Amino acid sequence: MSTVLEQIDGVVKGNDVVLFMKGTPQMPQCGFSQQVVAILNSYGIPYAAVNVLLDPAIRQGIKDYADWPTIPQLYIQGEFMGGCDIVNEMHANGELETMLKPFQNKENA
């Protein structure tokens, strides 16, 4: 499992914004992932997305990595933000906009 956690750590630390989700941004496979994708897309920022449905080890590993039982999970600059409910709350109170503002003019890497 440690190699899976190292792989996840590399993705989290190697991207400014990364979403571990069910499905892809173009085709979310659950309503919670779809909600977070819609919020991120509303800011027009580039972000990495990892489809946890492709690899059971990643699906379990991301839960262990954050000690958080649900997916999706959003990370900004290596820091775990939370799942769908927390992202919705941060979006509603303006906190997420403030955190994502530095990435609004970046190109997709």
Image (spheres, rainbow, N blue to C red):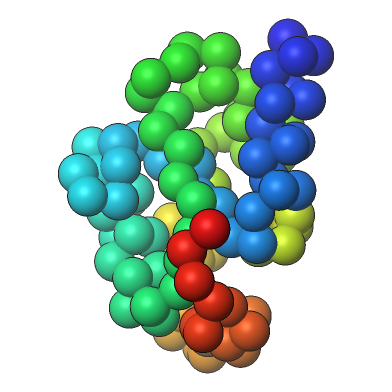
Q: Residue furthest left?
A: 27
Identified at 56% across, 52% down, the residue is 18
Quadrant assignment, res 1? top right
Foreground pick, 104 / 36 = 104
Q: Is residue 101 above or below residue 85?
A: below
On the image, the x and y values in percent for residue 21 come to 41, 41
Q: Is residue 55 left or right of residue 8?
A: left
Foreground pick, 61 / 7 = 7
On the image, the x and y values in percent for residue 23 come to 30, 36
**Residue 70 seen in the figure:** yes
Q: Is residue 100 above or below residue 5?
A: below
Foreground pick, 101 / 96 = 101
Q: Is residue 89 left or right of residue 13?
A: left
Identified at 73% across, 37% down, the residue is 10
**Residue 100 seen in the figure:** no
Identified at 47% across, 13% down, the residue is 56
